[in-house]
Image (tube, helix red, strand yellow):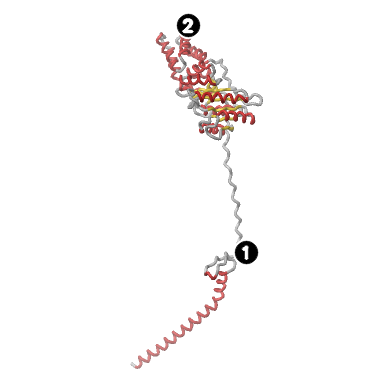
Amino acid sequence: MARLVASFCQTGAVMESLIVTLVIAFVILLVGGVTLLGPRLRGRRSGLSGGAGTGVDAGRGATGTIAPPEPSADQAAPAPLAPAAEAVAPAAPEVERPPPSAGRMVKLRSRLARSQNAFGSALLSLLSSAKLDDDTWEEIEEILITADMGAAPATQLVDRLRTEVKVAGTRDMTEVKTLLKTDLLEQVNPDLDRTLHTAPHGDRPAVVLVVGVNGTGKTTTCGKLARALIGDGRTVLLGAADTFRAAAADQLETWGSRVGAKTVRADREGADPASVAYEAVSEGIASGVDTVIVDTAGRLHTKTGLMDELGKIKRVIAKHGSVDEVLLVLDATTGQNGLRQARVFAEVVDITGIVLTKLDGTAKGGIVIAVQRELGVPVKLVGLGEGADDLAPFEPETFVDALIG
Protein backbone atom coordinates (compact mmCIF):
# COMPACT_ATOMS: atom_id res chain seq x y z
CA MET A 1 0.00 0.00 0.00
CA ALA A 2 2.78 2.40 0.88
CA ARG A 3 4.48 1.50 -2.39
CA LEU A 4 1.32 2.30 -4.38
CA VAL A 5 0.92 5.70 -2.71
CA ALA A 6 4.58 6.54 -3.41
CA SER A 7 4.10 5.58 -7.08
CA PHE A 8 0.98 7.79 -7.39
CA CYS A 9 2.75 10.79 -5.88
CA GLN A 10 5.63 10.34 -8.27
CA THR A 11 3.26 10.29 -11.26
CA GLY A 12 1.48 13.47 -10.06
CA ALA A 13 4.79 15.32 -9.86
CA VAL A 14 5.54 14.36 -13.46
CA MET A 15 2.14 15.61 -14.67
CA GLU A 16 2.58 18.89 -12.85
CA SER A 17 5.97 19.40 -14.49
CA LEU A 18 4.46 18.66 -17.91
CA ILE A 19 1.61 21.18 -17.45
CA VAL A 20 4.02 23.91 -16.37
CA THR A 21 6.21 23.24 -19.39
CA LEU A 22 3.19 23.54 -21.77
CA VAL A 23 2.04 26.83 -20.19
CA ILE A 24 5.51 28.33 -20.56
CA ALA A 25 5.67 27.25 -24.26
CA PHE A 26 2.23 28.78 -24.95
CA VAL A 27 3.25 32.12 -23.36
CA ILE A 28 6.46 32.21 -25.43
CA LEU A 29 4.53 31.56 -28.67
CA LEU A 30 1.91 34.23 -27.85
CA VAL A 31 4.51 36.89 -27.14
CA GLY A 32 6.45 36.03 -30.30
CA GLY A 33 3.32 36.21 -32.47
CA VAL A 34 2.33 39.63 -31.13
CA THR A 35 5.87 40.87 -31.74
CA LEU A 36 5.86 39.66 -35.36
CA LEU A 37 2.29 40.74 -36.36
CA GLY A 38 2.15 44.12 -34.56
CA PRO A 39 3.75 46.30 -37.35
CA ARG A 40 1.50 44.81 -40.01
CA LEU A 41 -1.68 45.48 -38.03
CA ARG A 42 -0.63 49.11 -37.40
CA GLY A 43 0.06 49.63 -41.15
CA ARG A 44 -3.35 48.27 -42.05
CA ARG A 45 -5.11 50.61 -39.61
CA SER A 46 -3.30 53.64 -41.03
CA GLY A 47 -4.33 52.59 -44.54
CA LEU A 48 -7.99 52.44 -43.44
CA SER A 49 -7.95 55.91 -41.81
CA GLY A 50 -6.16 57.89 -44.60
CA GLY A 51 -4.29 57.51 -47.86
CA ALA A 52 -5.93 57.48 -51.32
CA GLY A 53 -9.35 56.44 -50.06
CA THR A 54 -12.08 58.84 -49.03
CA GLY A 55 -11.57 59.93 -45.37
CA VAL A 56 -14.26 59.47 -42.78
CA ASP A 57 -14.63 61.47 -39.53
CA ALA A 58 -12.91 59.33 -36.83
CA GLY A 59 -14.94 61.00 -34.13
CA ARG A 60 -18.11 59.52 -35.71
CA GLY A 61 -16.60 56.05 -35.83
CA ALA A 62 -17.64 55.51 -39.50
CA THR A 63 -15.60 53.38 -41.82
CA GLY A 64 -13.88 54.74 -44.95
CA THR A 65 -13.68 53.59 -48.57
CA ILE A 66 -10.65 51.52 -49.33
CA ALA A 67 -8.67 52.82 -52.30
CA PRO A 68 -8.13 50.37 -55.16
CA PRO A 69 -4.63 48.93 -55.36
CA GLU A 70 -2.17 50.53 -57.71
CA PRO A 71 -1.74 48.48 -60.90
CA SER A 72 1.52 46.68 -61.19
CA ALA A 73 3.99 47.59 -63.89
CA ASP A 74 3.40 44.37 -65.81
CA GLN A 75 -0.38 44.72 -65.70
CA ALA A 76 -1.76 46.23 -68.94
CA ALA A 77 -3.87 49.39 -68.60
CA PRO A 78 -7.52 48.89 -69.59
CA ALA A 79 -8.36 50.03 -73.12
CA PRO A 80 -10.37 53.28 -73.29
CA LEU A 81 -14.10 52.85 -73.99
CA ALA A 82 -15.11 53.56 -77.59
CA PRO A 83 -17.41 56.58 -77.98
CA ALA A 84 -21.07 55.69 -78.36
CA ALA A 85 -22.18 55.60 -81.99
CA GLU A 86 -24.35 58.50 -83.03
CA ALA A 87 -28.03 57.69 -83.56
CA VAL A 88 -28.66 57.03 -87.24
CA ALA A 89 -31.69 58.80 -88.68
CA PRO A 90 -34.25 56.46 -90.26
CA ALA A 91 -33.83 56.14 -94.01
CA ALA A 92 -36.34 57.99 -96.16
CA PRO A 93 -38.84 55.72 -97.91
CA GLU A 94 -37.68 54.64 -101.31
CA VAL A 95 -39.40 56.53 -104.11
CA GLU A 96 -41.24 54.18 -106.44
CA ARG A 97 -40.93 54.30 -110.22
CA PRO A 98 -44.40 53.69 -111.69
CA PRO A 99 -44.76 52.17 -115.16
CA PRO A 100 -45.93 54.43 -118.02
CA SER A 101 -49.65 54.68 -118.70
CA ALA A 102 -49.45 53.61 -122.34
CA GLY A 103 -50.76 50.10 -122.97
CA ARG A 104 -52.33 49.66 -119.54
CA MET A 105 -55.79 49.03 -121.00
CA VAL A 106 -54.48 46.11 -123.02
CA LYS A 107 -52.72 44.63 -119.99
CA LEU A 108 -55.88 44.92 -117.93
CA ARG A 109 -58.16 43.62 -120.72
CA SER A 110 -58.58 40.23 -119.07
CA ARG A 111 -60.10 41.79 -115.94
CA LEU A 112 -62.59 43.75 -117.99
CA ALA A 113 -63.43 40.69 -120.08
CA ARG A 114 -64.18 38.58 -116.98
CA SER A 115 -66.61 41.15 -115.59
CA GLN A 116 -68.42 41.69 -118.90
CA ASN A 117 -68.39 38.13 -120.19
CA ALA A 118 -72.07 37.47 -119.41
CA PHE A 119 -73.13 40.56 -121.35
CA GLY A 120 -71.33 39.60 -124.56
CA SER A 121 -72.20 35.92 -124.33
CA ALA A 122 -75.92 36.62 -123.95
CA LEU A 123 -75.98 38.94 -126.95
CA LEU A 124 -74.04 36.60 -129.21
CA SER A 125 -76.15 33.63 -128.19
CA LEU A 126 -79.35 35.42 -129.19
CA LEU A 127 -77.96 36.92 -132.38
CA SER A 128 -76.68 33.59 -133.68
CA SER A 129 -79.83 31.64 -132.85
CA ALA A 130 -81.80 30.00 -135.67
CA LYS A 131 -84.85 32.14 -134.99
CA LEU A 132 -84.60 35.92 -134.80
CA ASP A 133 -88.18 37.09 -134.34
CA ASP A 134 -89.59 40.18 -132.64
CA ASP A 135 -89.42 38.56 -129.20
CA THR A 136 -85.73 37.79 -129.65
CA TRP A 137 -84.93 41.34 -130.70
CA GLU A 138 -86.84 42.70 -127.71
CA GLU A 139 -84.80 40.44 -125.45
CA ILE A 140 -81.60 41.77 -127.02
CA GLU A 141 -82.77 45.33 -126.42
CA GLU A 142 -83.59 44.50 -122.80
CA ILE A 143 -80.07 43.14 -122.25
CA LEU A 144 -78.58 46.38 -123.57
CA ILE A 145 -80.82 48.54 -121.36
CA THR A 146 -80.04 46.53 -118.21
CA ALA A 147 -76.37 46.97 -119.06
CA ASP A 148 -76.87 50.70 -118.25
CA MET A 149 -76.66 51.74 -121.89
CA GLY A 150 -79.89 53.69 -121.69
CA ALA A 151 -83.13 53.23 -123.61
CA ALA A 152 -82.40 55.52 -126.56
CA PRO A 153 -78.92 54.14 -127.41
CA ALA A 154 -80.18 50.56 -126.94
CA THR A 155 -83.11 51.07 -129.33
CA GLN A 156 -80.85 52.70 -131.90
CA LEU A 157 -78.32 49.86 -131.72
CA VAL A 158 -80.97 47.14 -132.03
CA ASP A 159 -82.67 48.78 -135.02
CA ARG A 160 -79.41 49.08 -136.90
CA LEU A 161 -78.21 45.59 -136.02
CA ARG A 162 -81.54 44.07 -136.99
CA THR A 163 -81.31 45.61 -140.44
CA GLU A 164 -77.68 44.50 -140.94
CA VAL A 165 -78.35 40.90 -139.93
CA LYS A 166 -81.39 40.73 -142.21
CA VAL A 167 -79.48 42.14 -145.18
CA ALA A 168 -76.50 39.85 -144.62
CA GLY A 169 -78.81 36.88 -144.08
CA THR A 170 -76.32 35.29 -141.71
CA ARG A 171 -76.37 33.45 -138.39
CA ASP A 172 -72.66 32.71 -138.43
CA MET A 173 -71.14 33.51 -135.01
CA THR A 174 -68.05 35.18 -136.44
CA GLU A 175 -70.02 37.43 -138.82
CA VAL A 176 -72.58 38.36 -136.18
CA LYS A 177 -69.79 39.21 -133.70
CA THR A 178 -68.16 41.49 -136.26
CA LEU A 179 -71.43 43.34 -136.88
CA LEU A 180 -72.05 43.74 -133.14
CA LYS A 181 -68.52 45.04 -132.46
CA THR A 182 -68.79 47.60 -135.24
CA ASP A 183 -72.10 48.95 -133.98
CA LEU A 184 -71.00 49.05 -130.34
CA LEU A 185 -67.79 50.86 -131.25
CA GLU A 186 -69.83 53.48 -133.06
CA GLN A 187 -71.92 53.99 -129.92
CA VAL A 188 -68.77 54.39 -127.79
CA ASN A 189 -67.61 56.97 -130.34
CA PRO A 190 -63.88 56.48 -130.92
CA ASP A 191 -63.64 59.91 -132.57
CA LEU A 192 -64.01 61.81 -129.29
CA ASP A 193 -60.84 63.58 -128.14
CA ARG A 194 -59.68 61.65 -125.08
CA THR A 195 -56.41 63.55 -124.67
CA LEU A 196 -55.58 64.27 -121.03
CA HIS A 197 -54.26 67.85 -120.96
CA THR A 198 -51.49 67.67 -118.36
CA ALA A 199 -48.59 69.39 -120.13
CA PRO A 200 -47.37 72.75 -118.73
CA HIS A 201 -47.84 75.91 -120.78
CA GLY A 202 -45.03 78.42 -120.51
CA ASP A 203 -43.97 78.90 -116.91
CA ARG A 204 -47.28 77.63 -115.53
CA PRO A 205 -48.25 74.06 -114.78
CA ALA A 206 -51.34 72.36 -116.09
CA VAL A 207 -54.10 72.28 -113.46
CA VAL A 208 -56.35 69.23 -113.09
CA LEU A 209 -59.41 69.62 -110.85
CA VAL A 210 -60.92 66.32 -109.68
CA VAL A 211 -64.55 66.32 -108.53
CA GLY A 212 -67.14 63.75 -107.48
CA VAL A 213 -69.23 62.44 -104.60
CA ASN A 214 -68.00 60.50 -101.60
CA GLY A 215 -67.35 56.83 -102.17
CA THR A 216 -66.53 56.96 -105.86
CA GLY A 217 -62.77 56.62 -105.33
CA LYS A 218 -62.02 60.29 -106.04
CA THR A 219 -59.00 60.73 -103.73
CA THR A 220 -57.61 57.35 -104.77
CA THR A 221 -57.99 58.40 -108.41
CA CYS A 222 -55.93 61.55 -107.69
CA GLY A 223 -53.15 59.40 -106.25
CA LYS A 224 -53.25 56.91 -109.11
CA LEU A 225 -53.30 59.70 -111.69
CA ALA A 226 -50.20 61.23 -110.09
CA ARG A 227 -48.45 57.84 -110.37
CA ALA A 228 -49.43 57.49 -114.03
CA LEU A 229 -48.19 60.99 -114.91
CA ILE A 230 -44.90 60.47 -113.08
CA GLY A 231 -44.55 57.16 -114.91
CA ASP A 232 -44.90 59.17 -118.14
CA GLY A 233 -42.08 61.51 -117.07
CA ARG A 234 -44.11 64.39 -115.64
CA THR A 235 -43.47 66.20 -112.35
CA VAL A 236 -46.56 66.49 -110.17
CA LEU A 237 -47.78 68.43 -107.12
CA LEU A 238 -50.93 67.43 -105.23
CA GLY A 239 -53.39 69.83 -103.58
CA ALA A 240 -55.54 68.43 -100.75
CA ALA A 241 -58.55 70.77 -100.99
CA ASP A 242 -60.84 68.23 -99.31
CA THR A 243 -60.55 70.03 -95.97
CA PHE A 244 -63.75 68.57 -94.52
CA ARG A 245 -62.18 65.13 -94.09
CA ALA A 246 -58.71 64.96 -92.50
CA ALA A 247 -58.23 61.38 -93.67
CA ALA A 248 -58.47 62.54 -97.29
CA ALA A 249 -55.41 64.80 -96.92
CA ASP A 250 -53.49 62.02 -95.15
CA GLN A 251 -54.42 59.56 -97.88
CA LEU A 252 -53.38 61.94 -100.64
CA GLU A 253 -50.08 62.70 -98.89
CA THR A 254 -49.35 58.97 -98.64
CA TRP A 255 -49.94 58.51 -102.37
CA GLY A 256 -47.65 61.45 -103.15
CA SER A 257 -44.81 60.37 -100.85
CA ARG A 258 -44.57 57.00 -102.61
CA VAL A 259 -43.66 58.65 -105.90
CA GLY A 260 -41.90 61.78 -104.65
CA ALA A 261 -44.79 64.22 -105.23
CA LYS A 262 -45.29 67.03 -102.71
CA THR A 263 -48.74 67.55 -101.18
CA VAL A 264 -50.04 70.99 -100.19
CA ARG A 265 -52.62 70.72 -97.40
CA ALA A 266 -54.35 72.87 -94.79
CA ASP A 267 -53.00 73.11 -91.25
CA ARG A 268 -56.43 72.49 -89.76
CA GLU A 269 -59.61 70.64 -90.57
CA GLY A 270 -62.39 72.74 -92.07
CA ALA A 271 -60.11 75.35 -93.67
CA ASP A 272 -61.26 77.17 -96.79
CA PRO A 273 -60.89 74.69 -99.71
CA ALA A 274 -60.48 77.48 -102.25
CA SER A 275 -57.47 78.92 -100.37
CA VAL A 276 -55.80 75.49 -100.29
CA ALA A 277 -56.36 75.08 -104.02
CA TYR A 278 -54.95 78.55 -104.67
CA GLU A 279 -51.89 77.82 -102.53
CA ALA A 280 -51.31 74.52 -104.32
CA VAL A 281 -51.29 76.19 -107.73
CA SER A 282 -49.02 78.98 -106.42
CA GLU A 283 -46.59 76.37 -105.07
CA GLY A 284 -46.74 74.51 -108.37
CA ILE A 285 -45.76 77.65 -110.26
CA ALA A 286 -42.94 78.45 -107.82
CA SER A 287 -41.50 74.92 -107.92
CA GLY A 288 -41.86 74.58 -111.69
CA VAL A 289 -43.79 71.30 -111.78
CA ASP A 290 -45.59 70.12 -114.90
CA THR A 291 -48.98 69.31 -113.39
CA VAL A 292 -50.98 70.27 -110.28
CA ILE A 293 -53.77 67.84 -109.31
CA VAL A 294 -56.35 69.30 -106.92
CA ASP A 295 -58.56 66.91 -104.94
CA THR A 296 -61.86 68.40 -103.80
CA ALA A 297 -64.35 67.41 -101.11
CA GLY A 298 -66.81 64.66 -101.89
CA ARG A 299 -70.00 66.58 -102.53
CA LEU A 300 -73.53 65.29 -102.61
CA HIS A 301 -75.04 66.40 -105.88
CA THR A 302 -78.21 67.36 -103.94
CA LYS A 303 -76.38 69.86 -101.66
CA THR A 304 -76.55 73.27 -103.33
CA GLY A 305 -74.16 75.02 -100.91
CA LEU A 306 -71.38 72.50 -101.43
CA MET A 307 -71.80 72.62 -105.19
CA ASP A 308 -71.51 76.43 -105.09
CA GLU A 309 -68.25 76.03 -103.11
CA LEU A 310 -66.92 73.87 -105.94
CA GLY A 311 -67.59 76.67 -108.41
CA LYS A 312 -65.70 79.06 -106.11
CA ILE A 313 -62.64 76.76 -106.10
CA LYS A 314 -62.55 76.78 -109.89
CA ARG A 315 -62.86 80.59 -110.02
CA VAL A 316 -60.06 81.09 -107.48
CA ILE A 317 -57.72 78.73 -109.33
CA ALA A 318 -58.52 80.55 -112.58
CA LYS A 319 -56.78 83.66 -111.15
CA HIS A 320 -53.50 81.90 -111.98
CA GLY A 321 -54.73 80.95 -115.44
CA SER A 322 -57.05 78.39 -116.95
CA VAL A 323 -58.02 75.07 -115.38
CA ASP A 324 -56.90 72.56 -118.00
CA GLU A 325 -58.98 69.55 -116.92
CA VAL A 326 -62.06 69.05 -114.74
CA LEU A 327 -62.42 65.32 -114.25
CA LEU A 328 -65.64 63.92 -112.81
CA VAL A 329 -65.11 60.61 -111.01
CA LEU A 330 -68.09 58.23 -111.20
CA ASP A 331 -68.56 54.79 -109.72
CA ALA A 332 -69.38 52.59 -112.72
CA THR A 333 -71.51 50.29 -110.55
CA THR A 334 -74.04 53.03 -109.64
CA GLY A 335 -75.69 53.07 -113.08
CA GLN A 336 -78.45 55.66 -113.50
CA ASN A 337 -77.65 57.30 -110.14
CA GLY A 338 -74.21 58.10 -111.52
CA LEU A 339 -75.86 59.77 -114.50
CA ARG A 340 -77.92 62.00 -112.19
CA GLN A 341 -74.74 63.02 -110.36
CA ALA A 342 -73.08 63.83 -113.66
CA ARG A 343 -75.91 66.15 -114.74
CA VAL A 344 -75.68 68.28 -111.58
CA PHE A 345 -71.89 68.53 -111.59
CA ALA A 346 -71.97 69.58 -115.24
CA GLU A 347 -74.20 72.52 -114.29
CA VAL A 348 -71.66 73.83 -111.75
CA VAL A 349 -68.33 73.28 -113.52
CA ASP A 350 -67.40 72.57 -117.10
CA ILE A 351 -66.60 68.86 -117.07
CA THR A 352 -63.89 67.98 -119.59
CA GLY A 353 -63.64 64.25 -118.96
CA ILE A 354 -65.07 61.29 -117.05
CA VAL A 355 -63.17 58.82 -114.86
CA LEU A 356 -65.11 55.56 -114.42
CA THR A 357 -63.93 53.57 -111.42
CA LYS A 358 -64.68 49.95 -110.47
CA LEU A 359 -65.30 48.98 -114.09
CA ASP A 360 -63.77 45.57 -113.41
CA GLY A 361 -66.42 44.61 -110.84
CA THR A 362 -70.17 44.30 -111.20
CA ALA A 363 -70.37 47.34 -113.46
CA LYS A 364 -72.14 47.03 -116.77
CA GLY A 365 -70.27 48.37 -119.76
CA GLY A 366 -73.19 50.35 -121.11
CA ILE A 367 -72.48 53.16 -118.62
CA VAL A 368 -69.65 54.30 -120.89
CA ILE A 369 -72.09 54.96 -123.74
CA ALA A 370 -74.77 56.47 -121.50
CA VAL A 371 -72.58 59.00 -119.67
CA GLN A 372 -70.90 60.18 -122.85
CA ARG A 373 -74.26 60.77 -124.52
CA GLU A 374 -75.60 62.51 -121.41
CA LEU A 375 -72.70 64.97 -120.96
CA GLY A 376 -71.25 65.14 -124.43
CA VAL A 377 -67.76 64.63 -122.94
CA PRO A 378 -65.55 61.56 -123.28
CA VAL A 379 -64.59 58.91 -120.79
CA LYS A 380 -60.85 59.53 -120.45
CA LEU A 381 -59.76 57.16 -117.68
CA VAL A 382 -61.06 53.90 -116.23
CA GLY A 383 -60.25 52.10 -113.01
CA LEU A 384 -59.86 48.36 -113.50
CA GLY A 385 -58.75 47.17 -110.07
CA GLU A 386 -57.48 48.11 -106.65
CA GLY A 387 -53.79 48.07 -107.57
CA ALA A 388 -51.76 51.29 -107.56
CA ASP A 389 -51.27 51.15 -111.33
CA ASP A 390 -54.75 49.96 -112.35
CA LEU A 391 -55.88 53.35 -113.68
CA ALA A 392 -55.74 53.26 -117.47
CA PRO A 393 -56.42 55.67 -120.36
CA PHE A 394 -59.68 54.60 -121.97
CA GLU A 395 -59.31 52.89 -125.35
CA PRO A 396 -62.66 52.30 -127.15
CA GLU A 397 -61.46 49.44 -129.36
CA THR A 398 -59.95 47.48 -126.47
CA PHE A 399 -63.07 48.10 -124.39
CA VAL A 400 -65.46 46.75 -127.07
CA ASP A 401 -63.24 43.72 -127.69
CA ALA A 402 -63.35 42.93 -123.98
CA LEU A 403 -67.15 43.30 -123.91
CA ILE A 404 -67.79 40.89 -126.73
CA GLY A 405 -64.79 38.61 -126.28
Label 2's element?
helix
Residue farthest to the bottom, as pictured: 2
Residue 158, image x, y percentages? 46, 11
Image position of 20 (left or right of 50): left
Residue at image position (61%, 22%) is 322
Residue 89: quarter of image: top right
Residue farthest to the left, as pictured: 1
What separation in Å lies between label 2 and label 1 (alpha carbons)?
117 Å
Q: Mark 1 packing: few (<14 Cα in 10 Å), some, or many (20+)? A: few
- Residue 73, which numbered label? 1
Upstream in sequence: badge 2 or badge 1: 1
Image position of 20 (left or right of 1): right
Taking depth in this image into account, of 66 and 165 the one nearest to the observer is 66
Residue farthest to the right, as pictured: 202
Residue 55, image x, y percentages? 57, 67
Residue at image position (49%, 17%) is 370
Whether residue 35 is visible, yes or no, is: yes
Taking depth in this image into account, of 395 and 327 the one nearest to the observer is 327
Identify which amino acid the numbered label 2 is placed on: Val
Taking depth in this image into account, of 95 and 333 the one nearest to the observer is 333
Up/down of 120 relative to 76, above or below: above
Residue farthest to the top, as pictured: 167
Residue 40: quarter of image: bottom right
Q: Which residue is mark 2?
A: 167
Residue 61, image x, y percentages? 52, 70
Identify which amino acid the numbered label 1 is placed on: Ala
Label 1's element?
loop
Q: Mark 2 packing: few (<14 Cα in 10 Å), some, or many (20+)? A: few
